[in-house]
Image (cartoon, grey):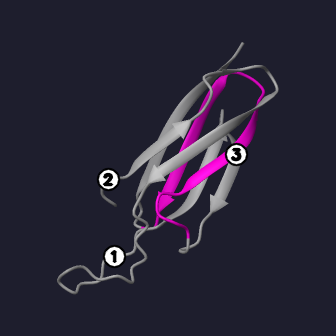
Amino acid sequence: MAEGVRARVKVPSSASAGESVVIKTLISHPMESGQRKDSEGNIIPRSIIHRFVCDFNGQNVIDVNMQPAISTNPYFEFEAKIPESGEMKFTWYDDDGSVYEESKSVSVG
């Protein structure tokens, strides 16, 4: 597991039914390629976030497969239509088997 990984998500807490809202996500992650060496000459193991998924009430909104050239601290901004009150679940998958999750509720009023 990479050290200091922190997911941040910005989602409006409320929306009108059928409204498209802007979702912003950023995960603090070093995205280690596995090609660098530490101060002792040992290869630093690869640790790259290779997939990001967002679901709303269990239904997929976005599913992104990332490649090794993605930058440190991947940021995504996208729109999602909010049909009803519910929960947005954000999941990041790391090459080392770690899974990072965050959830935010959205109420329709």
Residue marked by disc 2: 4
Lower position in the chain sequence, tag 2 or tag 3:
2
Q: What's the residue type where badge 3 is placed? A: Phe
Q: Is 52 colored magenta in this rendering?
A: no
**Up-down relation of residue 55 to residue 47 (above or below):** above
**Up-down relation of residue 24 to residue 104 (above or below):** below
How far apart in space, not on screen, are marks 2 and 3 (Cα)?
25 Å
How far apart in space, not on screen, are marks 1 and 3 (Cα)?
31 Å
Q: Marks 1 and 2: which is nearer the front?
A: 2
Residue marked by disc 3: 78
Residue 76's disc number: none
The quarter holding residue 81 reads: top right
**Up-down relation of residue 42 to residue 32 (above or below):** below
Lower position in the chain sequence, tag 1 or tag 3:
1
Residue 47: image location, x then y, percent: 40, 69
The quarter holding residue 56 reads: top right
**Up-down relation of residue 44 to residue 78 (above or below):** below
**Residue at position x 20%, y 80% in the image:** 39
**Residue at position x 60%, y 42% in the image:** 24
Residue stretch rendered in magenta on the structure: 70-95
Q: Quadrant of the N terminus?
A: bottom left
Q: Secondary structure at mark 2?
A: loop
Q: Secondary structure at mark 3?
A: strand
Q: Is 88 colored magenta in this rendering?
A: yes
Question: Main SS type for the magenta part?
Answer: strand
Residue 17: image location, x then y, percent: 79, 21
Residue marked by disc 1: 45
